[in-house]
Amino acid sequence: MAKVISKNKDAFFNYAMLDNYEAGIELKGWEVKSIRAGNVNLRGSFCSFKGNELFLSNMHVNLYMNVSGDETAPRKLLLHKSQLKKLREGVKVKGRTIVAKTLKWSNKGLVKVDIALATGKTKIDKRRTIKERDLERINKKYY
């Protein structure tokens, strides 16, 4: 059972997830220590291709102690070639993007990122999501 470190709630609200992938992430030592302390935020993070590699941008990792480094530097995601090919083909379709959903610890103690190929939701879809969430909350309260 993987333990969730951080969840990108904005991604779940603003995007409809199509395909899900679990990717490894290339981190420095101070970044792992900061993540272990819970000082990480996925809000506003997204994935983009540079050459044949996929990078996670705008993931904010607070500096650990007095280390000098970039808090929002792009971090390389580790995926199989076939997965990268599917993601590259999916992004070519207009209106699709790759978003980071959750950051979690794997069973082996490694940091993993759940990413998804996603399309943006319309206002109507967002209202429907809010309505379903409210109905679920009411049903939990009274039953």
Image: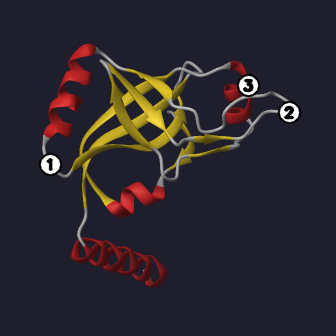
Q: Residue furthest top?
A: 81
Which residue is at 48% across, 52% downward?
44
What amino acid does circle 1 point to?
Answer: Lys
- Name the residue carrying label 3: 30
Which residue is at 27% across, 45% downward?
97
**Which circle, 1 or 3, is nearer the viewer?**
1
Q: Which circle's residue, 3 or 2, is located before the other in the chain? A: 3
- Secondary element at image label 3: helix
Q: Which circle's residue, 1 or 3, is located before the other in the chain? A: 3
As measured in the structure, the alpha-carbon distance from the residue carrying label 1 to the one carrying label 3 is 38 Å
What number is the disc on residue 41? none
Q: Which circle's residue, 2 or 1, is located before the other in the chain? A: 2
Q: Is residue 13 left or right of residue 18?
A: right
Specify few, some or many for label 3: CA neighbours under 10 Å numbering under 14, 14-19, or 20 or more: some
Q: Is residue 53 above or below residue 139?
A: above
Q: Is residue 128 left or right of residue 77?
A: left
Which residue is at 15% across, 38% downward?
92
Nearer-the-camera pick, 100 or 70: 70
- Name the residue carrying label 2: 65
Q: Are marks 3 and 2 in contact (CB under 8 Å)?
A: yes
Q: Is residue 124 left or right of residue 27?
A: left
Q: Is residue 8 above or below residue 76?
A: below
- Name the residue carrying label 1: 94
